[in-house]
Image: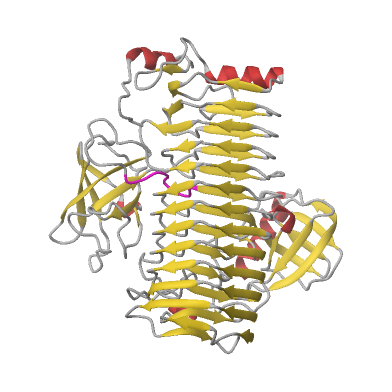
């Protein structure tokens, strides 16, 4: 990726070709011949306590030999890598840093960028007279010949540089692939002439590529990433998978980098997709004082996985996920209702591929989602200690590998597509964050079958956050996540699941400003306290989000299928033109206390 003051030289290109990490102009020059990968490998091999990478700007390429990322950190224990003052410019679309099987690793000070960029950007300059395409003039300093890989597009307001409200992300499918008319000008075919998706001449647009993540953290425990900054990348900024977890991300920055040489407009985008994403860890991550902005999808996501139930009879199940004896499982019906939890007593792998194919075909025939073929490369027959009444089509989640104990504290989330903070984990805290401008909801607790992301949340506190101007993306009739703060359960039949999926949720002392629809939405929950929240300038515009679920978009708080909800000392200041009432609680709500305990100013 281009960066102010960086000049690629023939010598640097030659060094990269030889697999050597070379310095280029634009930062403090590192010592001659410094090889970051070799420094790290040597420190790990010797069991060193610390290694320092000389400050400077480095252009890097993957070293090869089975290591496909630009920097590979594998098997490190009790090691601190001090990369303060280091700018690492990745020269391919491969992952920037791969951290695998590390314990008590600390990585500090590293800044990551890409050349070429993971996106380009420009201005919508013309619509075809018949509406069959629109043209984009690309900004100088950004890639001028984007290929078919630059297929995901979002609009930005030319005055504020924020995501433009009320448009759907554009995906360049086969009939909508980008055509390079000439360097610096592209044409995007348009198939829906009756609906231009609020795309207007003069809008700014980012065209994003797809590919690898910035930093991958796999099967690691108690690692710390401090003062690490990622300017751009082709998918997620950070993705952590599996293992013990309990990793800490302190002052993590995922933010657009400096304006490229020759450009006059700042970068509109950081990541193509999510900012930070944690999956299937035993102990959830801690994020403190992080800044995650301008991402192409959810800013912060923490979840486990669902495994399809291929076969079920009493205590015997066949599932598509490896488990161990002693693991807990939670069975969720295809109506998204928790059947209960049990402990695994026996595991037998199904090794016959034909048998797995037959199981998957039976599941797909039963499933309401005919387009999503389940994983069939592995399946296990398990025996559990209780009959939960499982059935074909159910899903199983794994409470011991679901990111429990997570913390998201004092983070700034700004100007991202989709959700700001999306949690599907338990025993956690979301506090003192600012979520500003997420196009869907600001803070969400919601399992999603569609993405196989689990599960319901229990014992979670949402406290002291400011959620501002969220939910201003396109009106989505089928989205259940309509509240600025949403506690809900994904469903495909237009009905919210029964109470009891989410449990013991506390929403207190939050400020919600300038958001359409409900400020707080709660469904399918038991034992919820909503106390001391401030709702300011609500309902400034109308959005039809969630109307399939009969969400009252004119209410400040909307409740459905909940048990034991307590409302106390909440305040509404300035209900907007599309707000009509403080509370709507449906007939499915039982045990509601404090419905009238609100101050309206």
Q: Is residue 411 above or below residue 233?
A: below
Residue found farthest to the left: 129
> Of residues 566 and 297, which is closer to you in this image?
566
Q: Magenta span: helix, strand or loop, mainly? A: loop
Q: Quadrant of the N terminus?
A: top left
Left or right of 96 on screen, residue 178: left
| Quadrant assignment, res 28 | top left
Left or right of 57 on screen, residue 260: left
- Residue, x 55% and y 31% (percent of image)? 108
In x, y percent, where is residue 156? 28, 54
Left or right of 111 on screen, residue 407: right
> Of residues 121 and 535, which is closer to you in this image?
535
> Of residues 125 and 442, which is closer to you in this image?
442
| Quadrant assignment, res 488 | bottom right
In x, y percent, where is residue 518? 45, 75
Q: Which residues are magenta?
A: 268-275
Q: Is residue 285 magenta?
A: no
Q: Quadrant of the C terminus?
A: bottom left
Q: Is residue 483 above or below residue 10?
A: below
> Of residues 600 and 79, which is closer to you in this image?
600
In x, y percent, where is residue 396? 70, 62
- Residue, x 36% and y 64% (percent of image)? 473
In x, y percent, where is residue 326? 84, 54
Please name the colour scheme applied to the rendered image. secondary structure
| Quadrant assignment, res 59 | top left
Q: Can residue 373 be seen?
A: no
Left or right of 368 on screen, residue 306: right
- Residue, x 32% and y 24% (percent of image)? 6
Q: Can residue 426 be seen?
A: yes
Residue found farthest to the top: 32
């Amino acid at each position: 990726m281009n960066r102010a003051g960086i000049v690629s030289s023939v010598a640097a290109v030659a060094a990269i070709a030889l697999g050597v990490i070379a310095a280029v102009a634009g930062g403090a020059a590192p010592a001659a011949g410094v090889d970051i990968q070799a420094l790290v490998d040597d420190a790990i091999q010797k069991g060193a306590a610390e290694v320092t990478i000389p400050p400077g700007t480095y252009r890097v390429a993957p070293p090869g030999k089975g290591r496909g990322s630009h920097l590979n950190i594998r098997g490190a224990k009790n090691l601190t890598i001090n990369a303060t003052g280091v700018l690492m410019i990745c020269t391919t679309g491969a992952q920037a840093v791969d951290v695998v099987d590390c314990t008590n690793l600390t990585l500090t000070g590293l800044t990551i960028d890409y050349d070429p960029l993971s996106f380009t950007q420009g201005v919508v300059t013309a619509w075809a007279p018949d509406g069959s395409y629109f043209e984009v003039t690309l900004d100088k300093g950004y890639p001028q010949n984007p290929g078919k890989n630059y297929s995901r597009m979002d609009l930005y307001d030319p005055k504020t540089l924020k995501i433009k409200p009320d448009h759907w992300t554009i995906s360049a499918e086969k009939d909508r692939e980008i055509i390079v008319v000439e360097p610096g000008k592209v044409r995007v075919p348009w198939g829906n002439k009756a609906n231009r998706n609020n795309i207007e001449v003069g809008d700014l647009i980012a065209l994003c590529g797809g590919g690898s993540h910035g930093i991958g953290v796999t099967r690691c425990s108690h690692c710390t990433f401090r003062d690490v900054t990622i300017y751009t990348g082709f998918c997620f900024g950070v993705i952590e998978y599996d293992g013990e977890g309990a990793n800490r991300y302190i002052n993590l920055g995922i933010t657009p980098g400096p304006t490229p040489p020759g450009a006059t407009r700042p970068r509109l985008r950081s990541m193509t997709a999510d900012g930070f994403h944690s999956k299937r860890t035993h102990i959830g991550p801690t994020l403190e004082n992080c800044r995650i902005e301008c991402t192409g999808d959810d800013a912060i996501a923490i979840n486990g996985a669902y495994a399809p139930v291929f076969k079920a009879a009493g205590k015997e199940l066949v599932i598509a996920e490896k488990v161990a004896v002693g693991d807990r499982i939670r069975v969720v019906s295809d109506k998204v209702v928790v059947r209960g939890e049990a402990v695994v007593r026996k595991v037998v792998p199904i090794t016959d591929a034909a048998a797995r194919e037959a199981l998957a075909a039976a599941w797909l025939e039963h499933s309401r989602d005919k387009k999503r073929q389940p994983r069939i490369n592995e399946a296990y027959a398990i025996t559990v200690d209780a009959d939960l009444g499982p059935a074909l089509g159910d899903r199983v989640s794994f409470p011991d590998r679901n990111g429990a104990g997570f913390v998201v504290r004092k983070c700034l989330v700004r100007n991202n597509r989709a959700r700001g903070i999306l949690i599907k984990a338990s025993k956690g805290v979301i506090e003192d964050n600012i979520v500003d401008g997420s196009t869907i909801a600001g803070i969400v607790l919601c399992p999603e079958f569609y993405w196989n992301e689990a599960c319901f949340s229990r014992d979670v506190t949402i406290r002291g956050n400011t959620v501002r101007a969220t939910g201003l993306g396109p009106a989505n009739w089928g989205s259940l996540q309509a509240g600025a703060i949403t506690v809900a359960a994904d469903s495909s039949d237009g009905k919210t699941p029964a109470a009891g999926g989410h449990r013991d949720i506390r929403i207190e002392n939050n400020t919600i400003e300038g958001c359409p629809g409900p400020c707080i939405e709660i469904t399918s929950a038991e034992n919820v306290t909503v106390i001391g929240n401030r709702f300011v300038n609500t309902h400034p515009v109308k959005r039809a989000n969630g109307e399939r679920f009969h969400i009252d978009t004119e209410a400040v708080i909307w409740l459905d299928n909940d048990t034991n909800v307590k409302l106390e000392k909440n305040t509404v200041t300035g209900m907007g033109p599309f707000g009509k009432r403080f509370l709507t609680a449906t007939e499915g709500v039982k045990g509601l206390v404090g419905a009238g305990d609100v101050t309206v100013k």
